[in-house]
Image (cartoon, helix red, strand yellow):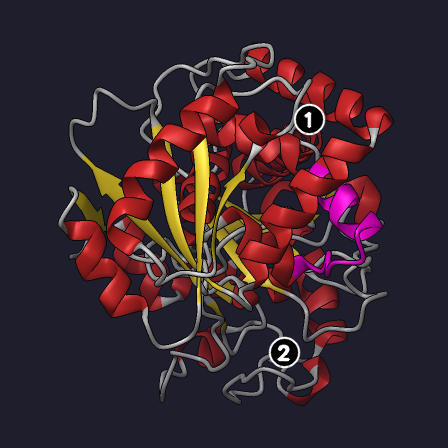
């Protein structure tokens, strides 16, 4: 699909479109002759009564092993191969000029390609089903109004209805198939759109993790986790060298509130795009705001490591390259088809024992983390809680579990707060 379209134009069905297809087909047939199985008019312009962008979609169906010959023949009439655009079995072609023909998208498809099956199934279903043709019309018009200058927003907004139709046609509607439908280029653009949205809301780090290796009930049935991190101000972390401060406690609460806002709005944005999304706010994960209850079967740190934004330090906190452990975390779980990052499965701390030696409660064992290592094999949580409560009382008279020593002392945090490059 051409992602360079600048304005979304959706028009009522035009009886001329089949004739426009025949004119293009005639020109292609003149060079391909009997080399192909069929040349099919697909897409919305192939369905009488359906609103569509005024662009003819064409699939040339071929046998296995003759693509290079077809490519060479098409080049003689001005078509240039433009790769598969991330969709297996479907090769795209572009052209310049051809002002005598209606604007069109040309694909060469292997006869067994899943994408070809989807194109033909969607076309034939909509030709024969008035109810879903009207439903699809409505969503196309709604998305065109909502995203008049955003082709990816338009495409993504239609996707839930398309996937519903695929299901009725007996086609695979799994998460992987949704990824294939969108194509790699579109997925990357959509992923960047979500990332930019979250960064505009105030996120300092955003990562996307594949959670499918986890049990479905742990991830609430969602295949993807979006990890969101916000950083503490440098001067706040510099201020807790000796003991936690009231300022640190206030920023702790402030950043948690900011994260709740970011993930809530981010989940709403995804929902408006037609996807399921769960904002893992403090209320949702069962955090009471005083540090006493912090229970969840899917910690934000797990989502963060699956998204590759950092690793678990010996202190059992997330460590990031840019900000050390001077961050707060939250997450969104979603079924939106997003490009995911490579997970971090091992610690980058190496032989460093700085946090282990500095911990005032002796809660850190000095064992390097790796994915799957149980929490109590490298960290004594009860000692941390007890010591943190004592230190918050000494630091600012608070009865809360806040310490921050391992955050402040971490070499990666030190690099951040002291502007070390």
Is residue 166 covered in magenta? yes
* Mark 1, secondary structure of its residue: helix
Residue under numbered circle 1: 272
The percent coordinates of residue 365 (x first, y second) are 58, 87
The percent coordinates of residue 55 (x first, y second) are 42, 25
Residue under numbered circle 2: 363
Quadrant assignment for the N terminus: top left
Residue 397 tag number: none
- Highlighted magenta segment, given as a residue range: 162-175
Kindly report the distance in space between the C-alpha atoms of the residues bearing marks 1 and 2: 44 Å
Residue 370 in sight: yes
Q: Nearer the viewer, residue 118 or 254?
A: 118
Residue 164 lies left or right of residue 92; in this view the side is right
Quadrant assignment for the C terminus: bottom left
Residue 300 in sight: no
* Mark 2, secondary structure of its residue: loop
The percent coordinates of residue 153 (x first, y second) are 52, 28
Is residue 74 covered in magenta? no
Residue 187 lies left or right of residue 317; in this view the side is left
Q: Earlier in the sequence, mark 1 or mark 2?
A: 1
Whether the residues at callouts 1 and 2 have beta carbons within 8 Å, the answer is no
Please identify the quarter of the rendering in which residue 165 is found: top right
The percent coordinates of residue 4 (x first, y second) are 31, 29
Q: Nearer the viewer, residue 65 or 161?
A: 65
- 327 relative to 359, above or below: above
């Amino acid at each position: 699909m051409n992602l360079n379209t600048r304005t979304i134009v959706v028009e009522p069905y035009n009886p001329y479109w089949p004739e426009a297809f025949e004119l293009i087909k005639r020109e292609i047939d003149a060079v391909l002759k009997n080399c192909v199985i069929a040349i099919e008019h697909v897409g919305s312009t192939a369905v009488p009564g359906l609103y569509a962008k005024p662009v003819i979609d064409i699939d040339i169906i071929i046998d296995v092993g003759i693509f290079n010959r077809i490519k060479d023949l098409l080049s003689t009439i001005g078509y240039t191969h433009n790769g598969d655009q991330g969709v297996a079995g479907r090769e795209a072609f572009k052209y310049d000029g051809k002002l005598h023909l209606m604007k069109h998208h040309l694909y060469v498809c292997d006869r067994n390609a899943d994408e070809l099956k989807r194109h033909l199934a969607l076309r034939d279903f909509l030709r024969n089903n008035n109810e879903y043709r009207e439903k699809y019309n409505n969503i196309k018009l709604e998305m065109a109004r909502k995203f008049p200058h955003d082709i990816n927003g338009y495409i993504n907004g239609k996707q839930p209805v398309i996937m519903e139709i695929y299901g009725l046609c007996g086609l695979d509607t799994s998460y992987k198939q949704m990824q294939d439908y969108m194509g790699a280029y579109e997925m990357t653009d959509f992923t960047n759109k979500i990332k930019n949205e979250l960064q505009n809301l105030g996120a300092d780090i955003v990562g996307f993790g594949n959670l499918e290796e986890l049990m479905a009930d742990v991830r609430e049935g969602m295949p993807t986790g979006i990890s969101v991190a916000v950083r503490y101000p440098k001067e706040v972390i510099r201020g807790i060298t000796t003991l936690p401060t009231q300022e640190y406690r206030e920023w702790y609460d402030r950043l948690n509130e900011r994260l709740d806002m970011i993930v809530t709005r981010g989940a709403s944005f995804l929902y408006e795009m037609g996807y399921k999304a769960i904002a893992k706010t403090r209320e949702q994960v069962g955090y009471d705001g005083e540090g006493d209850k912090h229970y969840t079967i899917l910690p934000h740190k797990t989502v963060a490591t699956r998204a590759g934004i950092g690793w678990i330090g010996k202190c059992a906190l997330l460590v990031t390259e840019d900000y050390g452990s001077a961050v707060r975390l939250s997450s969104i779980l979603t079924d939106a088809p997003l490009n995911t990052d490579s997970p971090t499965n091992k610690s980058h701390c190496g032989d460093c024992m700085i946090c282990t030696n500095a911990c005032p409660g002796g809660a850190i064992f000095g064992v390097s983390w790796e994915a799957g290592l149980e929490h109590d094999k490298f960290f004594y949580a009860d000692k941390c809680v007890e010591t943190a409560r004592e230190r918050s009382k000494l630091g600012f008279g608070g009865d809360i579990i806040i310490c921050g020593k391992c955050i402040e002392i971490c070499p990666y945090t030190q690099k951040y707060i002291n502007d070390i490059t």
